[in-house]
Amino acid sequence: MHLTNSATWIEAQQQGSITAPSLAAEGFIHCSTEHQMRDVANKYYRGATNMVLVHIDPAALTSPLKWEPPAHIDGSPSLPDEPLFPHIYGVINLEAVIRVIDFPLNPDGSFDLPAQLTAFSITLINQVPHHHQEAAELSCEAWKHDFPEDTTQTYLDMFTATGTYANRFVEVFAALNQADELLGLATLVDDDELPGATEPGPWLAAVFVVPEARKLGVGSALVDHVVSRSRELGYAEMFLYTEHQDQWYQKKGWSYLRDTLFNDIKHVVMRNAL
C-alpha cells in the first residue's frame, strides 16, 4: 500500500505512473502493509486531508520491490527487531494498482483503517469449531498432491489440538470476514514433514486462500500473523518450502535457502530471520 493525496493520484493517472518526492531523495517510494498503514499515517500524516490508499499488486510491478527496515528521519540506524517495510525502487506503474481507497480523517485528525481493510480477522481455528469441517475439506483438497495419505480427519485432529501435544507443536490460524465466512488458513508447526530437512523449525505451512478472496491481502495478512506469532514465541528464524510461490515470499522478506525434492517435485526451502 502507498499513501498519497488525491491530487497526486489524479496526476499519476495523467502521467501513467505514480511517483513521490522520496524517489528522488532516497531512491525509493515508501509503502506499507495494510497492518502497518494506520500507524504510519498517524505518525507522519496526522491532520492531512484528501488522502488515498493505493493498493498495489507486487507481482504486477515493473520496478523492483525490496523489504527493508524503516528509514529513520533523524538518521539513526535501524534496530534488529524493527519490522520490514516494502520499498519500491522506481515509479509505480498503474497496471500494478488494484484499487484506490479514500482515507478520511477522524474529527481529531487521526486515521483509522477504512472498512475495506478491516473486512477480515485472524483467529486460532480451535476458537471457531463451526468452521472445522469446511477448513478440513479445503485443506485436504489443497494439499492432496503433497500429502495424499491425509484425510479430512487428519486436519480435524490438527484443528482441535493447538499448542503442544504428543511432543509436537502446531497452531492453525483462520481468516474470517465480517459475515463469518472462511477466507483462508495458515499454520505454524515445529516440523512440516519435509524429508531430509535439517532446518530446526518452526515452519510456516499450508497457506491457503479461497479463490474469491485472493488479491484482497488475506494471504499476506496470514503470513504476517504467523511470522509475528513466531517472533512472539521467541524464535530467531523460521522456514517454509514452496513449489511455486518463492518469488512472492521473497518479496515479503523471505530468503532462498536451497532447492529440494518432495514427492519428486522441485520445491524451494526459504528462511525468514526474525
Image: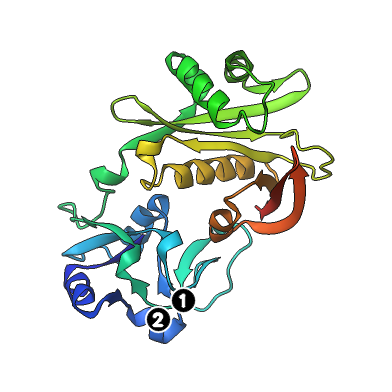
From the viewer's perspective, is 258 left or right of 52?
Answer: right
Rendered location of residue 146, percent (x, y) = 66, 33
Task: For the residues labelled 1 and 2, say whether their Cβ atoms are less than 8 Å apart.
Answer: no
Residue type at the position of mark 2: Leu
Q: Is residue 60 above or below residue 231?
A: below
Q: Nearer the viewer, residue 232 or 57?
A: 57
- Crowd rating for badge 2 (residues with CA inside 10 Å; few <14, some 14–19, many 20+): some
Residue 57: x and y in percent read 39, 58
- The amino acid sitting under disc 1 is Tyr
Q: First in sequence, mark 1 or 2: give its number.
A: 2
State the CA–CA distance, disc 1 to disc 2. Answer: 7 Å
User: Where is 212 relative to 128, above or below?
Assistant: below
Residue picked out by circle 2: 23
Q: Is residue 68 above or below residue 186?
A: below
Q: Can you give x and y, in whole percent of width and height, for residue 230 in the image?
A: 63, 41
**One can see residue 179 in this view:** yes
Q: Quadrant of residue 4?
A: bottom left
- What secondary structure is marked by label 2? helix
Residue 89 disc label? 1
- Kind of element beneath mark 1: loop
**Quarter location, residue 102:** bottom left
Find the residue positioned furthest to the bottom.
24
